[in-house]
Image (spheres, rainbow, N blue to C red):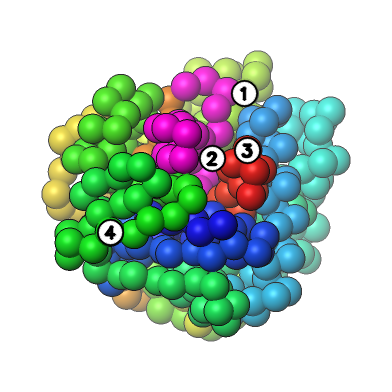
Amino acid sequence: MRVIVVGAGVLGTMHAWQAVERGHEVVHIEREEQARGASVRNFGLVWVSGRSAGPELDTALRARELWEGLGARVPALGFRTGGSLTVVRTEAELAVAEAAAARTDAGARGFELLTAAEARALNPALRGDFTAALWCRRDASVEPRTAQRALREALCASGRYTFLGGREVRDVTDRSVRDDHGATHTGDCVVLCTGAWLGGLVRELVSDAPVRRVRLQMMQTAPLGEELTTSVADADSFRYYPAYGGAALDALNSGQPQPPVAAEHAMQLLMVQRADGGLTIGDTHAYATPFDFDTVEDPYEHLAEVAERLLGRPLPPVRRRWAGVYAQCVEPGRVVLRHRVDEATVLVTGPGGRGMTCSPAIAETTADELGW
């Protein structure tokens, strides 16, 4: 079988990986020279902890298994275990953490409530002021800026993979795609993983896709100078991730509102250390289009303040700031939009902030459904 995959972000690359693993030939087409969208503008987190019970959690847990296997085969992914600590400071925040640790699926998630001393023993870089932390053993991370490149290099070694960068697909017909170089690529099936590109050809193929675009702001520092042994989140992440819903979260939201800048930008703190020792820190969420074309400084100042409070020390200098846009399926209960355009063509998009986490399992499901 010959599979045409359009889009070289993490979702498209994982579909290419599934096809090659199952013995097929892949032609992989990307409109940029290499992926430059949300797949490289994220934390690189394999984030199990906050997923909603049911299909989303099941997908994340399966993806976590697949990521670990990929990390063993492709060391350049930089796959790292270590889990995450969501740090709490107030009684209202602690109540949400306690409720999470008491969930019936807490064991599957790897949840454990730690005292401040236990959390510092696990992650000595956290010298700041906090009262407890929710540890999730199942969370992990990879290097987002280089993961797709590392996977492509491994795919090329198969001898059944061709990557064509700098080509935008203009038409999809009869198991073929035509690019803007005038070339036609024919296969047995076509998988479109176009990320946040929802106009043009995608709109023509699926005019009413239940998908929205979300914009975020993030930053990265110079090396910290010590190891951050886990990923770190603050209690505002309870407000963002669906796993934490319930009476305790309602009480937190009503009794302890976010600071105005955090509320305005739908913020949470996530912090993960890169292979070079720098810290990726974010993020904001904007849902109303058209998005601003510039980044604003207030959210960065808030994130730096929260991070420094948890670390108990000044941050290293910020070396990079950026904005990104991802596509999010808005149908309740769906992890991703998987739309059959025709018998041989499927559009897979809209994993939202779950893309880096869930893409290996999403691609596996697509491959199973298409009979690869």
Secondary structure under tag 2 reads helix
Of 290 and 100, which appears nearest the observer? 290
Which one is earlier in the sequence, the residue at label 1 or at label 2? 2
Where is mark 2, residue-wise?
A: 237
Q: How many marks?
A: 4
Of 349 and 6, which appears nearest the observer? 6
Marks 4/2: CA–CA distance:
46 Å
Marks 4/1: CA–CA distance:
49 Å
Residue type, numbered disc 3 = Glu
Secondary structure under tag 1 reads loop
**Residue 151: percent from left, percent from top:** 54, 72
Are the two marked residues, 1 and 2, in contact with CB atoms closer than 8 angstroms?
no
Examine the structure image and report whether residue 353 is included in the region drawn in magenta: yes
Please name the residue shown 51% across and 59% down the image: 2
Residue type, numbered disc 2 = Ser
Residue type, numbered disc 1 = Gly
Relative vertical location of residue 196 with respect to residue 316 in this rendering, above or below: above
Where is mark 4, residue-wise?
A: 184
Task: Using the rendered view, name the quadrant where residue 81 is placed.
Answer: bottom right
Are the two marked residues, 3 and 4, in contact with CB atoms closer than 8 angstroms?
no
Please name the residue shown 55% across and 79% down the image: 159
Provide the residue span drawn in magenta.
Answer: 331-355
